[in-house]
Amino acid sequence: MSISRDTFDPAKNYKRIRYHQDRDLLDSELNEQQELINLERRKIADILFKEGSILSGLDVTVLDNVLTLTPGMVYIDGHVEAVAGATLTYDPATTSGADYVYAELLKYNYGYTQDPSLINPATGEPTAEREKWVLALKTTDTTGLTLPNNVTERKVVPIYKFDRETGDVTATVQEKSNLYLRDLLGTLPGSRITVSSITEDQLSFAAAEGLNSLLQNLAERTFDQAGSYLVSGFDSFIGSVDDTDVEVITNAGRAYIQGFRHQRDLPTSTLVPKSVAIKSVRGEQKTYNISQRRYPVNSTPLKETTQVEAIVEMTANVTRGSVGGGEDLLDPNPVVDILEVSQGATIFQEGIDWQQSGNHVDWIGSGNEPAIGTTYTVRWTYTKQMIKGEDYVDGGWFGITAHPTAGTYHYVVTAFDGSGETAFNSGSVLLRMTLAGEMNRLSWLPVNGANGYRVYRATTNGSRTDFQRIKELGSEAISYIDDAVDEPVASNPPASTSAAVSMSTTQIELGNLNVVNFGRGALGDEPVNGSNCSIDYDYFLGRKDIIYATTREIKRLEGAPADFPKLPIVPEDTLGLCSIDCPPNSTDMTIRNFGLTRITMDQIHDIIKDVEDLKYNDAQYQMNNELQNRDAQSKKGIYSDDFSNTAQSDIYHAEWDARVNELGKFASPDRSAISTALEVDSGSSDASFFGSLALLPGNETVLVEQNDWSEERNINPYAVFDKPPAMLQITPNLGRRGQTGIAVTGINFTPSKSGIVLRCDGQVMASNLISDEAGRVSASFTIPTNARNGNRIVEMADGVYSARASLQI
């Protein structure tokens, strides 16, 4: 392309070019003239249309990851251009985010090589070149790619958004024009537009635009008046559950969101993944006790320990160095303390013969020391990075080398006293499938008179002799945890008994796995008794999610994992349906439906009536309180006297002749009571006598009998409200298992009621609580060690009323 120069500059605001007969006509001037015309035309076009707007056609059909588009017209770079239809394929693995449909404009420079007609037939010379526009639909933005041959410019605009999560396709430009009808007011010469002046398509377009505007205005008015609310349905519940996900099913229903109706005739399923986010703890301290091998971590549930550091004891022979009075290195190290240095029967004295210098035995030189090149024995402690699977494990030792394998284990627990041991009973055998790293917890009720208990284990339940004793416990024991550390002895449960006691019922369950277990010292290194151990570990965090509705979809909003997770904020312009409590690393999820239903006018009238009744009762109560020590008066036209005294009576009035019974709280004429015994001739009377009562004969006649009733109604006009519901308050409302004490206060229970039961996470904490005369109950308990993590229920029930409170464990 041979162009002398480009003189077009829109900043100069030139409007036309004037040619002169005595001046040469340059190619740059002709090209500039075209650019001036295009600029003015584009100014008008840009007012009418928005860049990337679809003016006609380009209808989309969606099939999985493939979009099929029909031919159509788009506005691009100041021109209305036709674009051919296309079938576009996107990555099928993408299931979130958005892809786009792009319109690519390529501006080609065409000469006689591309178009042979661009030749002067008279001279055979090439004529002026042409600029040709070619549009195509693309799946990606090609702006940064290398220009093809003969292309001088490329322009790319997105025209559709493809939501990969929902499959919805929406135009990127919703309002196609920059010009609104209000901008045309006063610009038309007539007062109306005649039908003959517009086309049918224009009328349809105007009607659709007007309808959309009307619907939007109505929706905004509805939302302003009532907000977003639920009409019916849309309650959620737990569906199917697998190892990693929980299906939350939201029922069909109807709601109004931002003024628009959202109705679904079929349930919607949402997969909620369990919460597996983790948090790390570094340097948690535990003091090792030689009588205890399992140490619970403070934050649970435990995922895994990453490092356990402990002080262990080491005894080894050391070769004396080649220099008298020198130092000998102790390995392994770092050394904490040197306990003893000896050679044969000779024990060297610290401070006289040797001293500790870091990781060395430092021979002082002035005292005794081993001969150079000889070996001597040193016993010392050092800090060791404990080895998992050798020195310790997370949880239990089942499935670890030199320990019982994972599998099904059978257990029997017997009791013994001074006379003997309870006999083997095949009906009391317990079993549990034990996985690697698990523990089995056995528990029983205490047996009165027992001196202790014996625990037997077997891999099969063929006969009594299959069971071998693994532990003997004292009389105070009510549980035993088999972590595969205690070794069995050759002792079977007896076939018969001479004991005077009977074994209680035994239960088996999974033991607490949130522990660091140091196991048997003979198989690995054991921490020094009384020393501190440092534990690094990761534990799982819980989460709270929300199911919410937009004007078109049901979606899930995932909350942030935390020790005490909070609900995420419901997105703006949506309606929250329910919350999902996702415990850490568990599919045991719970749902709380919000139920944000609209309040009807009938409900508002009921509330107003209740408020009026409340005001009336309050007025009566206030008036009765004030009547004791003031003159009689009326309130709201009602005169009130409780007859508890004569404070409101004018007892000095000349016509006063009455008495006030302060005990019975009634007023009556002043008279003297005279007791007269009732004399009855029982022989001649047909009355029935019951003690001091004389009942006249009569026949009972049923006047009206109604076997079916439609509602229960309190006919006492002074009892405006029913008994308030029982309520429960707990302090604090969060804590740790086996550590935190909880104070419980209940109100509005049955007065003076005994046998009230208190439960935490389904376990009985107290079973014989007693309420006072006002129905108040007080109690306390410590969170059970086997309570489940998460949001759990504390419940109190007296057989008539019950109340619940939430406890975060």
Image (spheres, rainbow, N blue to C red):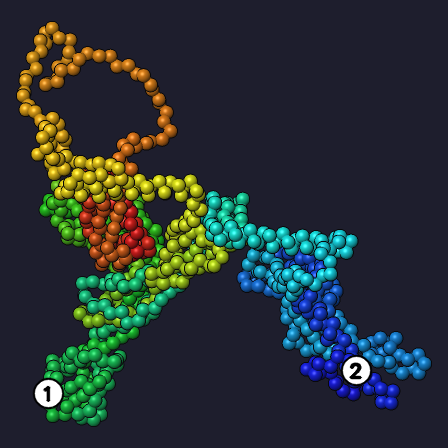
**Residue furthest toward the right?**
122
Q: Amino acid at mark 1?
A: Ile
Q: Which numbered marker is on residue 68? A: none
- Give residue 604's position: percent from left, percent from top: 40, 43
Q: Quadrant of residue 532?
A: bottom left
Question: Of 594 and 681, which appears nearest the observer?
Answer: 681
179 displayed left or right of 704: right
Q: Tag 2: Cα neighbours inside 10 Å, few (<14), some, or many (≥20)?
A: few
**Mark 1 element type:** loop
Alpha-carbon distance for marks 1 and 2?
Answer: 113 Å
Q: Tag 1: Cα neighbours inside 10 Å, few (<14), some, or many (≥20)?
A: few
Residue at position x 23%, y 77% in the image: 382
Question: Of 339 and 490, which appears nearest the observer?
Answer: 339
**Mark 2 element type:** loop
691 displayed left or right of 780: left
Q: Amino acid at mark 2?
A: Ile
Residue at position x 73%, y 61% in the image: 189
480 displayed left or right of 197: left
Q: Earlier in the sequence, mark 1 or mark 2?
A: 2
Task: Say which quadrant the N terminus sits in.
Answer: bottom right
What residue sits right under mark 2 in the picture?
A: 17
What residue sits right under mark 1 in the picture?
A: 352
- Give residue 120's position: percent from left, percent from top: 91, 80
Task: Say which quadrant the C terminus sits in.
Answer: bottom left
**Residue furthest toward the front?**
654
Question: Of 88 and 23, which appears nearest the observer?
Answer: 23
- Give residue 391's position: percent from left, percent from top: 28, 68
Q: Is residue 351 visible?
A: yes
Residue at position x 70%, y 63% in the image: 187
- Give residue 692's position: percent from left, percent from top: 10, 18
